[in-house]
Amino acid sequence: MPIAPVYITRTSSFMPNEPVSNDEMEPLLGQVGERASRARRMVLRSNQITSRHYAIDKTTGKHNYTNAQLGAEAVRGLLDAEFGLGDIGCLVASTTIADQLIPSHASMVHGELGAPACEVAGTTGVCACGMSALKYAYMNVLGGLHSKAVATASEAASYTMQGQNFAPEIDHQLAELEQNPEIAFEKDFLRWMLSDGAGAVLLEQQVPAGQRALRIEWLDILSYANEMDTCMYAGARKNADGSLTGWQQVSRDECQQDSLLAVKQDVKQLNANITHYTVEKPLRQLQQKYGIKPEDIDHFLPHYSSAYFRDKLADGLRAAEFVIPEERWFTNLATKGNTGSASMYIMLDEIFRSGRLQPGEKILCYVPESGRFAVAYMLLTVV
């Protein structure tokens, strides 16, 4: 018996406050130490991000949205007279770092919305957790458990990127940044790359009459944590043997002194493995599983954290014998920044509303995650 299709019928994104230019970043986030960052310009030159959004009021310098409120605003962007809060059968919300440890981020988003009782679930991780949320919603509709489900992902990275949270820069690293841009994946690097935002999608069993939609052909998520140690982390210290010492295992003083709550990256591990584990290895597997061909892809939506990785991604596609011409690539990294788990939602919303999609076209979405190396791929057809 054939499985009934599932469609993304609505998309939404919410970017808090006005865009923040490169020159506005440090005053808004706060300076670390007694002098301005000497790494900022080098990092921005490498990632090629020109503007982003923060949940910070430029006038007061204070946060004016919580992470949960960002997610709720994205969901509200799906609503109108034809689809209201009471029509949501299942709500799935995702983020990397929630506003609190408990309750769950998903419960907080539901509470912010004030929606009637419904099934609520949450996913967490790094970038790919947003796709895990989408898959949970997809499976609910696919299985006939709900006729309508909403998935949302949001990030409020600016809370952790505030200057007061970071120890002063280490001067001897700065000369290395010019020669090896990937070394900038230290705490200071992430301050000039991560940003805030949220997105949401509505999934339905049927497409409303006269409306364009995106049919989900498949959505696969692969973890390689069985092969790889942790690469990107927060709330822990990475030990020489690759294991983590979590924040609960140390004193509160030690937690502050070592900036354990700051987001960190194992740069050498990232640079050596990200292409192999998120492009070459999984794409070969997916080609065999689904018979997909690069010439069938009309639009490629890649999530990458920095333009520095664009060429590496292209190299990985060539190695996997899955070359997609770059004129078919679509990204809004330069103007929206890296919004982590929300990035794909924000890209989908922009291209869905652009008017450029034509019926029958195929969209391949790619979301890598360096937490402990995972990747999500999704194939969509415009209908």
Image (cartoon, rainbow, N blue to C red):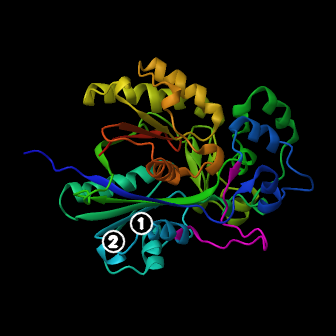
The quadrant in which the N terminus is found is top left
Q: Position of residue 359 (x, y in %)?
A: 32, 41
Q: Which residues are magenta?
A: 51-68
Residue at image mark 2:
83
Left or right: residue 89 compared with residue 94: left
Q: Which secondary structure lies at badge 1? A: loop
Left or right: residue 306 compared with residue 256: left
Q: Nearer the viewer, residue 119 or 214?
A: 214
User: In terms of image quadrants, where is residue 136?
Assistant: bottom left
Q: Nearer the viewer, residue 149 or 227?
A: 149
Residue type at mark 2 is Phe
For image coordinates 36% across by 63% down, the residue present is 150
- Residue 101 seen: no
Q: Position of residue 157 (x, y in %)?
A: 63, 58
Q: Position of residue 59 (x, y in %)?
A: 79, 72
Left or right: residue 89 compared with residue 226: left
Q: Which secondary structure lies at badge 2? A: loop
Residue type at mark 1 is Leu
For the residues bearing labels 2 and 1, Cβ distance under 8 angstroms: yes
Q: Position of residue 61 (x, y in %)?
A: 77, 70
> Magenta residues: mostly which secondary structure?
loop
Residue at image mark 1:
78
Q: Nearer the viewer, residue 93 or 331?
A: 331
For image coordinates 34% across by 37% down, the residue present is 361
The tag on residue 207 is: none
